[in-house]
Amino acid sequence: MTLSPETPHKPLPVDLRLYAILDPERAREQPLPELAAAAIAGGATLLQYRDKHADTRKYIDTTRAILAAISGKGVPLLINDRVDVAMAAGADGVHVGQDDMSPADARRLLGPRAIIGLTLNNTREALAAVQEPIDYGCIGGVFATSSKDNPKPPIGLDGLADIIANARIATPALPLGAIAGIDENNASTIIAMGADGIAVISAILMADDVSAAAHRLRVIIDASLAARGAGS
């Protein structure tokens, strides 16, 4: 579907509370469709499939397999970076970084119902997000992590607080998540600082029991949101 300037942007609902990122490099050779289903069973509210090394056909085939495994669960699946893969496989949207296809171009290609997320690395990008046709922002990386090669230093809690504060001024209704190095030990702090949810990879995928790990995180997130007065 192509989005014209006159087409209203009507995305699917976005629930960022527990955003599980599926990456084969962190999956301990377990099938991603099974991990996706287990993460949802534990309480994941949004999924992303990220594969920096798969060829296009394998990327599409794996996306379709994940979609089949989570069919009827009500949890959207987004694709990292690759708008073409999302289109071909019928995923629910994409997550793009600052150097990937622009959100506006992704929106034109994917249409008004697709979910489009954008990485926010600093305050300037957070303020500019008001101009973008996106459905959520994901702030990071907050802490050091081995799950992704990132030459930029972590923004830390002070950086996270600054970006959230500025993003709330520019786009008060935009859901905001946080990513990188987040686990059961610091998830409550991230939520208390104003994030609507957390994006995790290793904290779920590297666990012996993926569903149980997702459940523990979801309990922490929901309790922290309730304590902040944000509901669940």
Image: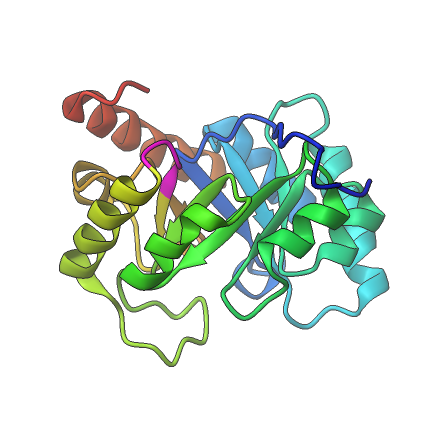
Q: Residue at x 70, y 41 (%)?
A: 5
Residue 214, percent from left and from top? 42, 36
Magenta segment includes 201 = no
How did the renderer colour the structure? rainbow
Q: Residue at x 59, y 67 (%)?
A: 100
The quadrant holding residue 82 is: bottom right
Q: Nearer the viewer, residue 217 or 87?
A: 87
Residue 67, percent from left and from top? 74, 37
Q: How many marks?
A: 0
Q: Main secondary structure of the magenta part?
A: loop
Q: Which residues are magenta?
A: 172-176
Q: Is residue 197 left or right of residue 223?
A: right
Inspect this view and state whether residue 209 appears.
no
The quadrant holding residue 157 is: bottom left
Which image quarter holds the C terminus?
top left
Inspect this view and state whether residue 18 appears.
yes
Which image quarter holds the N terminus?
top right
